[in-house]
Image: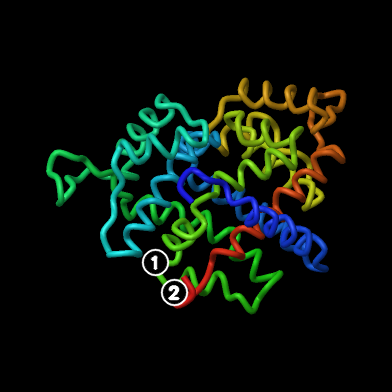
């Protein structure tokens, strides 16, 4: 499947997402997912830049996917630059994105560099425990909401009891980039802003979290401080989102989600939860 998008898998995810969104507890699961994502982003304030855009997180996804496949096959891992470059090119991530991300990931301790035991001339990029812990927290956000919708899957219990569960998620579901393409195709007015604009995702999480809890929208200064953004950056995002029809602005410029944002966000959450439901599995089923 290297370089190929599994369209049949995408079709299954669409179907499963629709079933999840029709679940009587979906509203509660969506609110929980959003609250957990807000807390995750707040707790990782200094690392928000590294996942601010889909191109950046794709590099992490490619690394985890290829490392996970190798590790599950023979308990070794690590990915060469050439392997990463090939994967990134397939999904339209440029060499600049890759080089920038590899540098950032080394600075923050997400990857370490080792020599290939079979060829000492080759460098391997290996995920660290810090990266695996970071990603595990992100997957746990979905697992907790899936426990509401599909308690028999025991998603959060699997993640808590099995240290390799997160690695398996990316090994078996590593074409999360295809999921990104699915969301882009399904939500053309929403997804490019949400995933490609630096800071748009945490802004939307904050707005939807406030709406789900019948609270006033946090100020731009508060949002900026919570997620490691600048106030100007948040203001620009608010105005861009309003131009796209995702927000309305009151007389004071306070944004509120529109019906388009509500519907788009609901679809996004259902797609993401359907994806994780397919790949958070006990070790014997990996």
Number of residues whose C-alpha sits closer than 10 Å to that of mark 1, classed few (under 14), some (14–19) or many (20 or more): some
Number of numbered labels in the structure image: 2
Give percent across and percent down for residue 96.
Answer: 41, 24
Height in image: 99 above or below 165?
above
Horizontal arrangement in the rendering, residue 44 relative to residue 105 (left or right): right
Q: Give the camera-side residue of 198 and 279.
A: 279
For the point 82% across and 24% down, which residue is it?
A: 252
Give yes or no for contact between labels 1 and 2 (Cβ–Cβ under 8 Å): yes
> Which numbered disc covers residue 122?
none
Residue corresponding to mark 2 = 283
Give percent across and percent down for residue 100.
Answer: 38, 28
Horizontal arrangement in the rendering, residue 52 relative to residue 18 (left or right): left
For the point 55% across and 64% down, which residue is it?
A: 279
For the point 44% across and 74% down, which residue is it?
A: 283
For the point 40% across and 36% down, which residue is it?
A: 86
The image quadrant that residue 97 belongs to is: top left
Q: Give the camera-side residue of 235 and 9.
A: 9
Quote the CA–CA distance across marks 1 and 2. 8 Å
- The local secondary structure at tag 1 comes to loop
Horizontal arrangement in the rendering, residue 42 relative to residue 127 (left or right): right
Q: Earlier in the sequence, mark 1 or mark 2?
A: 1
Task: Please say whether residue 79 is visible from this viewpoint.
Answer: yes
Number of residues whose C-alpha sits closer than 10 Å to that of mark 2, classed few (under 14), some (14–19) or many (20 or more): few
Horizontal arrangement in the rendering, residue 145 relative to residue 111 (left or right): right
Task: Please say whether residue 27 is visible from this viewpoint.
Answer: no
* Residue situated furthest left in the rendering: 120
Give percent across and percent down for residue 256.
Answer: 82, 36
Height in image: 84 above or below 279?
above
Give percent across and percent down for residue 136.
Answer: 46, 58
Q: Give the camera-side residue of 185 and 206.
A: 185
- The local secondary structure at tag 2 comes to helix
Residue corresponding to mark 1 = 164
């Amino acid at each position: 499947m290297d370089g190929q998008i599994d369209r049949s898998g995408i079709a299954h995810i669409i179907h499963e997402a629709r079933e999840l969104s029709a679940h009587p507890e979906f509203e509660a699961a969506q609110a929980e997912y959003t609250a957990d994502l807000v807390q995750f982003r707040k707790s990782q304030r200094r690392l928000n830049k590294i996942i601010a855009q889909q191109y950046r997180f794709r590099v992490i996804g490619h690394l985890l996917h290829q490392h996970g496949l190798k590790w599950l096959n023979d308990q070794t891992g690590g990915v060469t630059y050439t392997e990463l470059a090939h994967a990134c090119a397939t999904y339209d991530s440029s060499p600049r994105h890759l080089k920038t991300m590899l540098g950032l990931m080394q600075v923050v301790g997400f990857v370490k560099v080792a020599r290939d035991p079979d060829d000492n001339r080759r460098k391997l990029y290996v995920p660290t425990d810090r990266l695996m812990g970071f990603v595990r927290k992100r997957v746990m956000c979905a697992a907790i909401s899936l426990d509401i919708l599909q308690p028999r899957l025991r998603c959060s219990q699997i993640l808590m009891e099995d240290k390799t569960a997160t690695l398996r998620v990316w090994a078996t579901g590593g074409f999360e980039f295809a999921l990104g393409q699915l969301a882009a195709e399904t939500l053309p007015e929403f997804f490019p802003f949400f995933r490609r604009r630096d800071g748009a995702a945490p802004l939307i999480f904050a707005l939807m979290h406030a709406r789900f809890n019948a609270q006033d929208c946090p100020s731009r200064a508060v949002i900026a401080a919570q997620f490691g953004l600048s106030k100007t950056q948040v203001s620009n995002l608010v105005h861009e989102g309003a131009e796209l029809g995702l927000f309305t602005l009151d007389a004071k410029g306070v944004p509120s989600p529109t019906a388009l944002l509500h519907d788009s966000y609901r679809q996004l959450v259902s797609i993401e939860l359907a994806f994780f439901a397919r790949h958070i599995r006990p070790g014997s089923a990996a």
